[in-house]
Structures are given as C-alpha cells and as structure tokens.
Image (cartoon, rainbow, N blue to C red):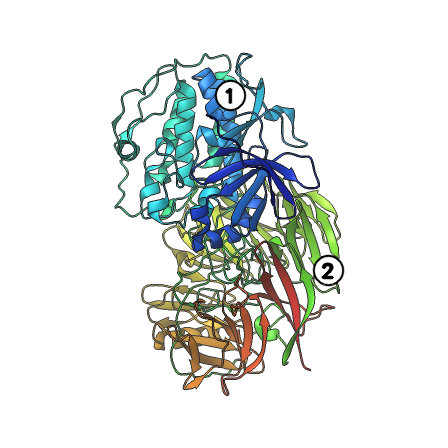
Amino acid sequence: MTTQSPASRHLGSSYIMESRIGAGAQGEVWRGRRTDSREVLAFKVLRADLVENPDVVDRFIKERSTLLRVRSPYVVAIRDVVIEGSTFAIVMDYVNGGDLRDLLRARGSLPPAQVASLGTRIAQGLSSVHRAGVVHRDIKPANVLLSSRPSRGGDPAETVATGVAPGWGMPEAVVPRLADFGVARICDTFSASHLTGVIGTPLYMAPEILSMQAPTSAADIYSLGIMLYEMSCGTAPFVGEPAQLLSQHARRDAGRPDGLPDVLWELIASMMAKQPNMRPAIELVAQRLEAMQSALAGMPAAPRLASPPQSTASVVPYDWDAPSPADAATAPTVLSGLTQATVTASAIPTLVSGQSVNVPGGLGQASAVGGAQAGAGAPVPMATSMPGGYAANTAGTTPPASFFPQTGPQGTGYTPADAAALAPRRPRRRWWMAAAAVVTVLAVVGAGWWYFFSGPSVDSTWPAALPEGNRVQEDQRYTEVDDPYLSADGSRLLYSNMSKVHLFDLTRKGTSKVWSGECDEARFWAGTSLLCSSTSGQATLVSDSGKTSKAPFPEGSTFLGATTDVAVISSGEGTASDGPLIAYDAAGKEKWRAGGHYEKGRVRNGFVLAYESKSKQIQVLSAKDGAVLMSETGDRPNFDSDTQLPGGVNIQTGPEAFSRITSSGATIYDADGSETGTVSGSFTEKHQWAASVPLDASALKEAYTSLAKASSSTTPVIGPRGTINVSIDVKACTAKVGDKKLALPEPAKGEQCVIKPIGGLRDGQLLMQVGKQGYISDETGALVVAVSPDSGKIGWKTQGTYVATVPPLGGGSSGARLMLGQGGTYNYDLVVSSVTSR
C-alpha cells in the first residue's frame, strides 16, 4: 500500500509547495517554487507541536536574519523564513543529488584523498555557519546534501568526484552542501522531553550536548570528526543503544581503523577530543584537510568495517557535572584575512557610533557589537554604564550580552541575539573584530541625589545631545535591514540587503544610497571608510566616495576596532596567532605600531585595550599614537565574552578617562594614563550606572563613589544636569525617583515588564526604554520615553527600541536625533527621528 503525497498548497502569496518529498523529526520537507519563478526550491515545514510552543515561535521570528545571512557554496542557502497562520516554513535551495549517507551506502569507505576533499568543503561550509553565530548541533551524513552542480556562478572546482559506478543514481561529481543548520537553533527552546531528534543524533553527538551548558560550535567539530571517521572506514566509532552511545562519547576513545593514514587519523582524533576546548578550530580543520589532499592522492580506501575497532578508556573523559572551562565557550572561527568573534545575547538594541545595529525580528533584544564580537570604540549615544551599556531592568530575563561585531571608536552597540548564543574560544582568531559594549540587567531602587556635570563636551553620538522638545518626528526610514553598523561619528549607516552591502549618509535628506557593493563581510574602517572582505580572503578598503584599494594588513590579522581617525589591527602572519598592534588611517597608511605579542583587544573612545602575552601585561594604549597608558600584570582577559570587562578594565565611559576594577575597588585614570584616584568597594557588571554623557576622571570617580554607596538594586542615572537614582519595582512594573512615581506606560496583561534607564537629557528629563517589541496588536510594545523626575509626567514618547543617537540632518556638532528599531514578524526597520517642539 502506498501513501499519496498531499495536494499542492500555497504558502503565503509568494510560494507554491507542490509535493511532499520527505519527513523528519522536526517536520516535513516539500518541493515547490516561487509563484513568479520556475526555480525549484525546498520547504522545511515545522511540525504542529513545535509551532504551538511560544518560545519556538519567538525564536523562529528572531532567527530569520541570522539564518538568511549564512552564505557559502557548501551550505544549503536559506532563502526565506515564512509564517502563515499555523504554518512555519524555512525556504531553501533544492539540492538534487541525494546526501552523503547515500554515497556511503554506495561506496562503503572512501579513499583518504576523497575524505579530505569532501571534508574540506564541509568544514568551510560549517565555518560560514559558525561565523553567523549558529551552532548546527546535528552534523551527520544525512544533513550533507550532494548537489550535481556548483552553486550559482560557482567554480567547477567546487565539485568532488564520487567514484560511484553507473546504476546507483549518484552523480559522477558532487558539491557537498550542509543542510538543516537553522532548525536546532530555532527549536532549542523546546522542553527537554520533546528534544528527541532535535538536538542531535546519538551516533554523532558531542558529549557536552547533554550538559547544562549551552552547546557551542566545538560540538559541531566533534560531530564532524565522527562523520570523517565513518567516511574513512564505513562505520561510526561507537555503536549501541542511545544510552550506551552517549556514555561512550563521554568516556571512551575511538579505536583507530586499519589503513587510515597518520595525518588524517591525527586530525580526526583531535576533533573527537572529549573536552571542547581541546578540539581544533573549524578553520584549522579546513586548512589541514585541504593541505593533506596532495599527500593522500592515490592511497586506497581503508577496508569497510562492519563494526568499529575496540575503543579504550579515555584519559580525559567528559564530566557532565563539571563546569565547562572558561575558554571553551565556543569554538574559534577564522576566515582568511581577519578574525571574527561570536556573539551572545542581549536585550534591547543600543547602538553607538562605530557599531553594529542588529535589531532583527524581535526588537526587544539587543546585543553589543563591534570588533569581532561586538563593538569596538568609545561609548557613544547610548547610556554608558559602569560596564559600558545602559542600565536595564527586565523582569525574568538574564543579563544580555552581545550579538554581532561592531567597530567604532566612540560607542557601544547592541543587537538582538539569542541568550544562548556563542562566546568563542579559538586557538587562532576569528576574522573580524573583537570586543563589544556590555549591557547588564539590573533592578534599580533608591532615593535620588545630584551632582553638577561639567565634564567633556557632548557630541551627537550621546543621548544628552538630543534637543529639548515635546514630540518626535520621523525623518528617515530604512527598511528590510540586516546586519547594520554605524560609523564612528554616527553619520554613516551600513547594512546588508539582497546580497549586497549598502552605505547611507544619515545627514542627507532621504534614504538614497551613497554606495552599494558585494561583500561577504563589511565593517567601518577609520572614519567613514569601509573594510570589505570576501570568503576567498580578499580584503578591500572602500572610501566614502566608493574608491577601492587593497587592505594593508597581512592575512591572519585581527581587526580590533576603529576611531574617527584610525583602524587598529593585531597583525598575524603565517602560523602566528599574535603580533604587534598596527593602526592605519582611512587610506590604509600605517600611523603607528606597538611591538609585542597581541592577539585580541577592544577599541573604545580613543583607547585600545589589549593583552601583551609575552610579558603577561593587560594594557591600555592611546589609539592616537600607540602610547601605553596603563600596563598591569594579570592573567589573559576573556575578550570573547561581552558580559565582562576584560581584565576589569573599563574604557567605555568616554574619551577623557578609563578605569580598572579589582577585588578591592576601582582605580581611575585620566586620558594621559595618570592615576587620579581610587574608590573602595565591590563592583560587578550586574550593578551599573546609566550615563548619557561622557565622563572625565572626576565624574568617573563620582560615579563609582555613588555606586559604592548604593544598594545592589540602585542605579544612578547620569546626564548633563547631574545624577539621580531611580528605583524600579519589578513585580509592580513601576519606577520611582524618591517618592515620585514615574508615569510610564504600563504593560498589557501577560506582557513582560521591561524598564531600562538610558540616561539623563539636557532638559533634566530621564530617557527610558519601556516595554519589549511585540507581535500582538493589543500589546504596549517597545517605547522610548522622556519622563520628568520631578513631576513624573512623560514629556514625549515614541514607538520602537532605542538603538543610537546620530547627527542631525545637514550634519554639524550641535543637536542629535534618535535611531530606533521597529519590526514586525518578518523584518525590521531602522527609523531616524528628530525631537521637536509643536
């Protein structure tokens, strides 16, 4: 008896799903097309019980831009993410050549050179997935589809001969393409009792997948090692019932199959290390597989095994109860040219000059960006808090971290990301930047007190530069935004759309493009120039006028961040993982060089924070001339986590001062590196202030002093008129200054309470983020409000999530405008608005 495929059906107004071609643990797979095209597409339709879970629905919406960003000839590209009623579908390329499981059935074991050739391409595809901040979590032969032709416009060299005799229905040559990388990320909020088939397949599952820690990209490297083992000898290294398999993955080392060359076996064995931090970076895996192909050419396949060789007790077994190593948060990712860091979640997008603005899908989330991680540069418009973000009070949420890299000298940026996102660990470095602004969740309680602010001048990248007024008027709207960034001075916006990168001048009326081009990755270089790179390793500088030139740094370098005058990189050549710091101007001319062994770092407010590994010194340098302003002995800081200040050093409070936190208190330094004082106390990133102005050494000391006196639930809000403490009652979802209740919009029934101070305005009002972006019409949603601390009344409010403040139309140094994120279920807009008077 045969089962007929369901009848064809429309998906929205754009697609027709013509026939069901398969089903799996997460749902069904259909073949179809766009209504206006004959190109065949594949549709993954999530099963009904997943769609009924609100967490999965929320994740589905938020992950759209991340999944669409992954591009590689060795990845099945996701074209669209569609929601229509109760149907949730992922639209992707249709691949017609079967999968790797089919090839292994036909061949048994593959020759070593073919294992290396296929493995190189699969690893390169996985690297692209990891660079987007996605952990696949279900690497297996069935998820490696085989295309009979290269990607559109691709090189025929992408293909690999299958060696399969005619009659097996297998093409003579194929391109391996990694599939299903978005499903586990969308579904990982589902309850553990429903996770069968979602978090991985036991034959290939890394031991840490079942731990309490969020899985990292190192788990994918383990699974790929298992798959390469099977490709080499025809069987996985461990067999048995699921419980037996999981135990073996954690406590047994795989036996070596006969006939496996040393160079291939050594790499596979290293990938199957029980401890995540002992596995090689995915870029290193790809490089080593590619390099060994010529040496393996002509070697016969190892005998096909019916069962794996005898395993042995692991010398370093995996302990599910042990805490994961701090440096094993995620596996490294290295793209030729530079390095890129990963991202963790955050809550509420706050951008500042030189940073990225990711606010896709569900705006209520924000994460720092810059550098490779998120944000490099000085804190700009947003509220710079003790750690560098703005104070946040979100009932029932965890402290936000960061999502995407951001660059820029003056600012801290935020983009939405999943709280379970990655925090990379890598032997080499990721290809873009490092370090980002930090946002932390906290509750604020207490009475207010003031001090008069007379610090550095406030430019248009700080919220305090917003003019006085009583209404907000929209000036510009940028639609269908993906992966946005601001230049260091806040005057230029860069984002991706339709496979291209677009540059806009925010100071011009309208939204016409200044420049468009094709880049796999793009960030702001010094000033308003761009750094554009392709996956082939080509890195190009693009001037504000569109003139291009070759990037000046050597391959293997790490981009740390930029100011309005210089871009700073850590130079790495050949196999070196560290080198001197080099600063270049907008044209790529070297401005200064600091000799030493530097690998990662952050750039903010004209300061460079880095670690010199040979002398074991945590250093702050001047971005202007490379002079060392502070050098203290210490352990290597974690530059890959946006939830902490590397080495306790805070360079996010403005260009006039920085500080270092120790177990006994905080030490304050002025812009020349002179120590100006210390404040005793216990300071943590979970307790911070919110500032809308840059702080000089005196004001910074005052801020720490107020923080030391405050309870853990009290947040000082700093503005041009001084500092005031705000208290928030999370249960009641109310905010007070002293005894005065602030008349903030109340959340709808069942809506999450979100109240986040951003800073003080020039007219004495407090700038606050209230609510979270929603998708239900009767929800209050996200609002930015200006509220008087004296009367408690709202002066003005506007819909959206605070992202940054940017210069006024026509440019100039006076005044500023709001940049807000507004989004629906499928995309989001960036809206630039002026505060005016009626």
Asked whether disc 1 touches disc 2, contact meaning CB atoms under 8 Å apart, the reply is no
Residue at 54%, 13% (x, y): give it.
167
In the image, residue 147 above or below residue 765: above
Please report whichever mark, 1 or 2, sits nearer to the chain's N-terminal start: 1
Q: Is residue 616 left or right of residue 596?
A: left
Who is closer to the viewer here, 162 or 455?
A: 162
Classify residue 380 by image quadrant: bottom right
User: Percent from the top left, x then y, of residue 626?
Assistant: 55, 55
Q: Residues within 10 Å of mark 2 (few under 14, many from 20)?
A: some
Q: Quadrant of the C terminus?
A: bottom right
Q: Answer whether residue 838 is visible to the viewer in this image.
A: yes
Q: Which element carries disc 1, helix, strand or loop?
A: helix
In the image, residue 633 above or below residue 100: below
**Circle number at residue 531:** none
The residue beneath circle 1 is: 293
Q: CA distance from mark 1 to mark 2?
A: 50 Å
Residue most extreme to the front: 1
Residue at 30%, 20% (x, y): give it.
309
User: Percent from the top left, x then y, of residue 251?
Assistant: 26, 33
* Amino acid type, label 1: Gln
Q: Residues within 10 Å of mark 1 (few under 14, many from 20)?
A: some
Q: Is residue 128 left or right of residue 685?
A: right
User: Percent from the top left, x then y, of residue 130?
Assistant: 49, 42
Classify residue 264 by image quadrant: top left
* Amino acid type, label 2: Thr
Foreground mark, 1 or 2, reads 2
The residue beneath circle 2 is: 511
Who is closer to the viewer here, 377 or 198?
A: 198
Q: Which element carries disc 2, helix, strand or loop?
A: loop
Who is closer to the viewer here, 51 or 420?
A: 51
Q: Count every numbered label the image shows and give the total.
A: 2
User: Percent from the top left, x then y, of residue 43?
Assistant: 56, 39
